[in-house]
Image: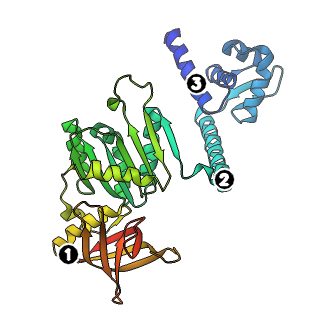
Amino acid sequence: MSENTLGKIRGKIIGKLMELGLSQNEARAYEALLELDVAAPLDIATFSGIPISRIYFILSELEKKGLVETQGGRPKLYRAIDPEKALYILTEKYFKAKEEALHFISRLSTEKRSVGKGSFWTIRGRKSIIERIKDIIEDASYSLAAASIDTFLTTLNKNIWNAVQRGVNTSMVIYSTNESATTSLVNKFKNNAMIRIRSVMAPSVFIADDRIGIAYIPEYLYRGRKEKRETALLIENEEFLPILGTYYRYFLWYPSKPVTSPEDLLSRPRTYCLYYRAVEDAKFLLSRGIKVKVKATGRFIGDDRKETTLEGWITDVYESPDKIVYNITVVTDDGRKYVLGGRRCVLEDFETERITLIPSQ
């Protein structure tokens, strides 16, 4: 092996050891011992290039970490422990530190002021944006609304798939730019998500559980001067999130072409946080003569705003021609009739936070 190749290998070993928490000199000393097998401090210093004035301290630190063994005498001799054992020690230390950090961060989070909640946040840089969108998808418990270019959705393929496998009710609008990518997405998700396609590009939108959303303006939508870093707007404010939801509904969902058949998709119970989607699907089921039971969580209008659960059978679904007013009429087992609206409704009897449609078999 040439000296040049050997030097590159040494550099990679030292770099990886530093990533696991060793200082540069500690990594150099340990790597030197891997090659020297057994050596005195002066030999280790000469081989590794560590100053003699520092070598004893460095070896002492490695000994404290359990990464080297010593043999008494004059001079004192050192050898590196088995590399697999050393890596185990370092990774265990890393994961322990990670767990402790998360524990203290969790404690800090419970004590912090709520000033950071219910706000708008700007995220810059494609990598950071992708990671934040992945977090939103992974945190979704009941529903996910997604709209983006086909190639970008392909990047999130695994995350969206994990969501639908958890039972998250997913609605997806694909901006078709690549026939192969679009076809692949449709084939993968058509039996698990409601999919629509459009050929017109637009900002990417992701909304989880109607509680958090993100609007992402990718570089291909910029006009004039190209921005150095792509930008996304994260919305946690419950008063303003409906604006993003309305944009998704009227400008992305309704104008796009449905490509998945709802028959099979709606044959099993589905939970909705986006109420207009529940109205759409309930209307479809009733049109097929299918009886639908509902379980709705929310609050009665004019009540003490205490959260309650309402169960019953759908007797009617209403959607105005302009799709501004939409609701579901439910009769409970004791014969009471209620009109259920979505979040922030004022005309109906019940403000629905979450609703599950259970079609009869």
Q: Secondary structure at mark 1?
A: loop
Sooner in the amino-acid sequence: mark 2 or mark 1: 2
Residue 16, by quadrant, is top right
Q: Secondary structure at mark 3?
A: helix
The C terminus appears in which quarter of the rendering? bottom left
Residue 341 drawn at (x, y percent): 36, 70
Q: What kind of residue is marked 2? A: Arg
Q: CA distance from mark 3 to mark 1?
A: 63 Å
Q: Nearer the viewer, residue 345 or 315?
A: 345
From the viewer's perspective, is residue 222 above or below residue 164? above
Q: Residue furthest right?
A: 74
Q: Nearer the viewer, mark 2 or mark 1?
A: 2
Q: What kind of residue is marked 3? A: Gly
Q: What kind of residue is marked 1? A: Ile
- Look at the image and tell me whether residue 159 can be seen: no
Which residue is painted at 31% across and 53% down in the image? 249
Sooner in the amino-acid sequence: mark 3 or mark 2: 3
Sooner in the amino-acid sequence: mark 3 or mark 1: 3
Q: Which label is found at residue 113? A: 2
Residue 22, by quadrant, is top right
Q: Nearer the viewer, mark 3 or mark 1?
A: 1
Q: Nearer the viewer, residue 71 or 306?
A: 306
Q: Which residue is mark 1?
A: 290
Residue 119 drawn at (x, y percent): 54, 48
Q: Which residue is mark 3?
A: 15
